[in-house]
Image (tube, rainbow, N blue to C red):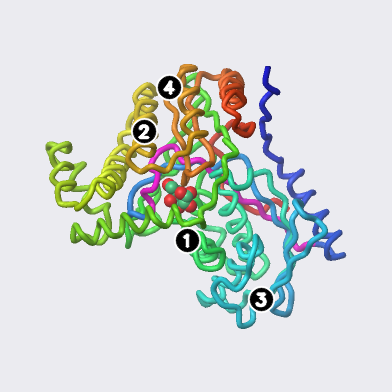
Amino acid sequence: MTEPIEFIDPLSDEEGADQAADLFRSAYGQEPQGVWASPGRVNLIGEHTDYNAGLCLPIALPHRTFVAIRPRADTTVRVVSTLSPDSVTTADLDGLQARGVKGWAAYPVGVAWALRKAGYSQVTGFDAAFASCVPLGSGLSSSAAMTCSTALGLDGVFGLGKGDSDEGRLALIDAAIDSENNMAGASTGGLDQSASLRCREGHALLLDFRPGLTAQQSAHQEACDFSKYGLELLVLDTQAQHALNDGQYLSRRQACENAARLLGVDNLREVADEVNESADPASALEEVLAKLPDDVTRRRVRHVITEIGRVPQFVDAFARGDMEQAGRLMDASGDSLRYDYEVTVPELDTAVEVARSCGALGARMTGGGFGGSIIALVKEGTGRQVAQKIADAFAQKGFHAPRALSAVASASGHRVR
Ligand code: GLA
């Protein structure tokens, strides 16, 4: 018999704010000016589409990263986290260059660096203390939870006035992406940061990444309550190693950019719309693929085009309450990520197979892949059993013990103290 699988509970406002503020006091001997929190996410469908100007459908998790912040008059930044409470990392914003900070501190320091670069000269140094219940490196956007909580905190303490509106938050999202891309060296696309700062409780966020859209055009709130249909969304963190800055993610992005060039378009969304809106999408897809030089490129492009097409179908099925169809689309997305985009690993494949064999309506990996988490749409009240079955299969195969959490569509980041 395997050990009972661990379920990760979210921290309440009170608990998270206490942990971050207590650490702040013990590290810096002062009171923070305030505490902000921003969530991790799971993406329901629309994977590896954001950097192809495509569509995604994330929900925010109830699991968040909390940051206690106090501004400084100089350009020094000090950061500390509950994971290593005795080790404060220091950086200087003055003269800081891209990739100039190493380790996890790159994420928060990079946000201040990016905001200053974008013209927010009132942003100076600061002291910050982090506490989080978003599992790290699990494909649940622990990085975005950190950069977005930092962006909200800096917005608050330096009075940028961007955090109070959805439109204003776009500037904070840009700074979070810039930090992850250019300070931390993780070539993330925008899904995670948008989810962390734009999601609404009880809703999934339909994101459209076509360039040039207004805030309003680029996001729609879609009601999302699994329990209304007698279902729950199980998230299972495989604990297989996952990192976005190890080259695999970048190589997928480059394959897509290269394919767009060969097809003579700015991004794969342009071809996706033509294919998915044509009278005969299957033949239109074959025609596009025939223009590409090799099997691998064809499969990468097939994933992106079909995945963009599945997002509105999923939204439609969900809105009609056709959860069987929503589940089938999740399965199709998962299979496309496994066989065409090739971003899964044996742990993800096993978890998905076991969830499906336990009767999940749909199951697939979520996030960037190469490790990380799966999501499974299961009957309400059965999540724990399904998770345990996956843990048993993992033990048999000699994989790391997985962890689980249950996901309800939660709110985006905000001030908690
Ligand atoms: C990671 C990236 C996102 C997105 C997903 C895949 O989470 O950070 O930008 O590309 O992978 O959908």
Q: Which SS class for mark 3?
A: loop
Please report the bounds of the magenta region as a residue range: 32-50
Q: Badge 3 is on which residue?
A: 124
- Determine the residue positioned at 73% across, 71% down: 90
In the rendered structure, which disc, 3 or 2, sits on the residue that comes first in sequence?
3
Residue lying at 59% horizontally and 47% vertically, measured from the top left: 137
Q: Nearer the viewer, mark 3 or mark 2?
A: 2
Instruction: First in sequence, mark 3 or 1: give its number.
Output: 3
Q: Which numbered disc flags the more N-terminal residue, 2 or 1?
A: 1
Q: In the drawing, does residue 361 fall left or right of residue 110? A: left
In the picture of the structure, the residue carrying the numbered disc 4 is 361
Q: CA gap, disc 3 to disc 2?
A: 47 Å
Q: Amino acid at mark 2?
A: Asp
The residue carrying mark 2 is 335
For residue 170, the mark is: 1
**Along the horizontal axis of the image, is 309 left or right of 243?**
left
**Marks 4 and 3, how far apart at CA:** 50 Å
Hey, what amino acid is under mark 1? Leu
Labels 3 and 2 touching (C-beta < 8 A) = no
Looking at the rendered structure, the secondary structure element under dot 1 is helix
